[in-house]
Image (tube, helix red, strand yellow):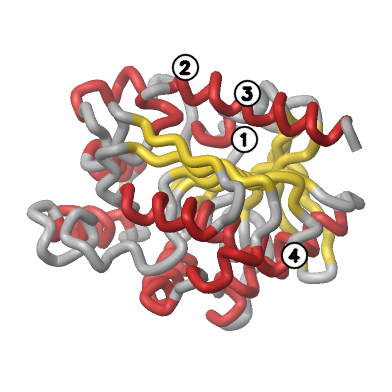
Amino acid sequence: MWKRHLLHTKRGIFEIFTKGIGEPLCVTHHYSQFNETGDYFAESFTSTHQVFLINLKDAGHSAKATMESELSMHETIEDLEAIKEALQLSSWHFTGHSTGGMLGLLYAISYPNSLQSLVIVGAAASDYTKIPDCIYHPDHPQFQYMQDLIEELKFPHLTQEDRRKLSIERTKLSLHQPDRYETYFSKPIYKTMAVSRMNAFAKEYPQFDVRDDLSLIKTKTLIICGNHDIQCPMKYSIEMHKGIRGSLFIPFEHSNHYPFLEESHRFSSIIQTFYTVLQHESSRY
């Protein structure tokens, strides 16, 4: 289990969960709602760092937004920086999966001195729904099914069992081998969706585009993507890699949107190597 904390910042109270020992590392997602059971992606980093898993505004027991603009990506970055300051950290590492990776890009652009490293998994620097390879593009054969599942998950009065079944079906769409779902998601880890944040993101992401600012990122960056990613197709990771000078890009041949589960041993090995090299380079200065 993760340890729960309520952190008072200049931008409100935030619910944070911590686990692991080492240098501080921030993990969040734009509209996920975490609890003491943690998160599969965040768990991947607890062997190398002290991980801070953050519920953003309107998620869990964090502060409630008084207006929708507080849920924007730019405002979220200001919240993350306020959390870092309240923790009395001069800098920390950041890693993000999917929309968490998009936040990571914006954070590294906005506060270059706040991040010691950046790991981005299955994300994009612009609207990722513009090509038919993406399941959120209307021409994708499973587009409507995905949309129906998302809308059903927003229903406030779903039973826990119905919500679980819908979540499983939605997740299976983003696995290279859907029949291995039970193997990948075998731990007692449960999270939900912060509907207000999801709705705000749905309005904002068509305008999200930081491609021209990628050259401003000086943070040591590792980019990972599954070859079969149908949420944020490989094209977007290659684009980020080309835009961020000195970044590392590693494709995962047998993964869709969850390489940290679909090829977990390789993922762990790469992460360990990345941070070991980073620590070695830092010690030389």
Q: Is residue 253 above or below residue 223?
A: above
Cα separation between marks 3 and 2 = 12 Å
Query: Is residue 83 in view from this perspective?
Result: yes
Pair 3/2: label in front: 3
Query: Is residue 166 in view from this perspective?
Result: no
Q: Residue 195, located in which quarter of the rendered image? A: bottom left
Nearer-N-terminus badge (3/4)? 4
**Is label 3 in a helix, a strand or a loop?**
helix
Which residue is pictured at 33% across the width and 18% down the height?
A: 183
Pair 3/4: label in front: 3
Q: Amino acid at mark 1?
A: Glu
Badge number at residue 231: none
Which residue is pictured at 36% across the width and 75% down the height?
A: 206
Q: Is residue 67 left or right of residue 173?
A: right
Which residue is pictured at 26% across the width and 34% down the height?
A: 175
Q: Amino acid at mark 4?
A: Tyr
Cα separation between marks 1 and 2 = 24 Å
Cα separation between marks 4 and 1 = 29 Å
Nearer-N-terminus badge (4/2)? 4
* Residue 55 locus on image (x, y percent): 62, 53
Q: Is residue 90 above or below residue 63?
A: above
How dense is the environment of label 2, judged by Cα within 10 Å: few (below 14), some, or many (20 and up)?
few
Which residue does the numbered mark 4 point to in the structure image?
Answer: 111
